[in-house]
Image (spheres, rainbow, N blue to C red):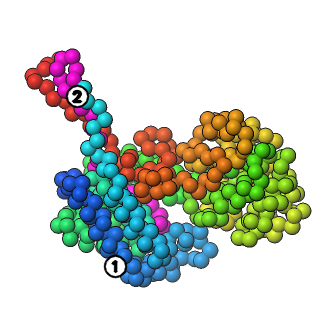
């Protein structure tokens, strides 16, 4: 038994040390003033700009290992423009108000007790994510700004990219004479994931960001509380009164502008009375980008008559499927009731849209659809922390506890009650 215990300890040593260091580092980050945290983020933005070519070189090492057909390849890619966007995102986060230390309530009770409720940082935030290296910078920046420590567990896909980005973060922390354990990159070895998920003594919250498979694994194995950032199965319903040309452009944008992201469109629902005219307008917009369409019987007839080149008959599995590629499914519905029923059945409660000129139907859709973001006459691609003015986001939460929708700086806090007395007893 002693031998077994020793083996267990030696296996756990590396990550346990990182977990302990993270818990200790909360003191260092929480003692910083608002101005110091802002200065730190601006210095990091400058480092990213200075090291663009080194970041791209490391990123290329990761890209070279990945198959060109993999939809995650676009998520992994860092170009000069994307690095510049990350630097700008750091500057945006620096400008945002600190969500910690906000007094939410102050009152004096009849017995003379003074009661205050204020926001405080969560503590140690663990984030498990896949191929997106921008998460490394976004999460680190959001945690620093809100006074949290972060443990980053990226995927093997982005190993070299995440390593150089973390190195730049550590160099910036060192420049400010700060504990570099405020931001740590955990090893990618899978055996450490369970340990992170069970580290209730050191970690306050876990956020999985990636595929449904990853999210399910974390939800099923975590002892530490979890905030899910869910997969996006997103529908756009084109109702009879919709402006057809405008609607076709919205649907095309939702599918084509960046197909590999969670707020991209997966399924088009279209009213029977306008199906032929609408799909004939939509078809060339999708064909221009070689979008593969999985069509139900009615829409298949329309699109095959129109000579759509990338057409398949939809199976049951093509609805409720997150494509993350230039693919989508199409279904013709009788009316809003059938559309709502379909969305209720297949939605992942991420982002849903209706295109209609009828105010009563707009309101009905907004009220009845259970999703984190519900749109009228706009592309689902707008579900984004930056777009909503929240700065960068950790992800889009599809659950209902604590955070829902773009999960950003404002939600990286919890509450604390402060009670001052003068000797009161109960």
Does residue 346 appear in this view?
A: no
Residue behind mark 1: 50
Q: Is residue 289 above or below residue 358?
A: below
Reply yes or no: does residue 124 show up in magenta: yes
Return the x and y of residue 17 as percentages of the image width and height: 24, 61
Q: Is residue 114 above or below residue 306?
A: above
Reply yes or no: does residue 332 show up in magenta: no
Q: Compute the Cα span from label 2 to label 1.
A: 48 Å
Residue behind mark 2: 115
Which quadrant holds the C terminus? top left
> Quadrant of the rendered structure where residue 24 is?
bottom left
Q: Is residue 80 left or right of residue 367?
A: left
| Magenta stretch, residue numbers | 108-132
For label 1, the crowd category at 10 Å Cα-Cα, with few meaning under 14, some 14 to 19 and many 20 or more, is few
Does residue 425 appear in this view?
A: yes
Q: Is residue 351 left or right of residue 164?
A: right
Return the x and y of residue 201 as percentages of the image width and height: 27, 48
């Amino acid at each position: 038994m002693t031998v077994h215990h020793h083996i267990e300890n030696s296996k756990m040593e590396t990550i346990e040390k990182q977990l302990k260091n993270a818990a200790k580092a909360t003191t260092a980050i929480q003692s910083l003033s608002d101005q110091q945290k802002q200065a730190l983020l601006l210095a990091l933005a400058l480092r990213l700009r200075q090291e663009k070519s080194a970041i791209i070189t490391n990123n290329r090492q990761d890209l070279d290992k990945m198959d060109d057909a993999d939809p995650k390849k676009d998520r992994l890619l860092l170009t000069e423009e994307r690095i510049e966007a990350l630097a700008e995102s750091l500057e945006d986060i620096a400008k945002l108000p600190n969500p910690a230390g906000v007094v939410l309530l102050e009152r004096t009770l009849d017995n003379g007790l003074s009661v205050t409720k204020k926001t405080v940082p969560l503590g140690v935030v663990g984030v498990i994510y896949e191929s997106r290296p921008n998460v490394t910078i976004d999460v680190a920046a959001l945690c620093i700004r809100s006074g949290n420590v972060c443990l980053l567990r990226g995927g093997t896909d982005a190993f070299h990219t995440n390593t150089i980005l973390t190195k730049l973060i550590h160099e910036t922390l060192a420049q400010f004479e700060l504990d570099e354990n405020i931001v740590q990159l955990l090893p990618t070895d899978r055996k450490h994931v369970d340990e992170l998920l069970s580290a209730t003594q050191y970690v306050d919250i876990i956020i999985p960001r990636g595929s449904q498979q990853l999210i399910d694994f974390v939800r099923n194995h975590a002892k530490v509380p979890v905030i899910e950032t869910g997969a996006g199965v997103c529908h756009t319903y084109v109702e009879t009164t919709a402006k057809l040309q405008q609607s076709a452009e919205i649907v095309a944008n939702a599918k084509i502008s960046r197909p590999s992201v969670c707020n991209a469109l997966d399924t088009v629902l279209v009213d029977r009375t306008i199906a032929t005219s609408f799909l004939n307008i939509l078809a060339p917009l999708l064909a221009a980008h070689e979008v593969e369409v999985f069509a139900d019987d009615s829409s298949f007839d329309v699109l095959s008559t129109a000579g759509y080149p990338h057409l398949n008959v939809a199976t049951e599995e093509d609805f409720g499927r997150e494509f993350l590629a230039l693919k989508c499914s199409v279904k013709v519905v009788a009316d809003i009731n059938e559309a709502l029923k379909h969305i209720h059945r297949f939605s992942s409660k991420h982002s849903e849209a209706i295109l209609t000129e009828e105010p009563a139907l707009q309101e009905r859709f907004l009220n009845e659809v259970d999703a984190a973001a519900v749109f009228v006459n706009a592309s689902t691609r707008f579900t984004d922390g930056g777009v909503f003015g929240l700065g960068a986001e950790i992800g889009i939460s599809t659950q209902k506890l604590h955070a829902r929708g773009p999960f950003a700086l404002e939600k990286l806090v919890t509450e604390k009650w402060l009670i001052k007395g003068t000797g009161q007893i109960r």
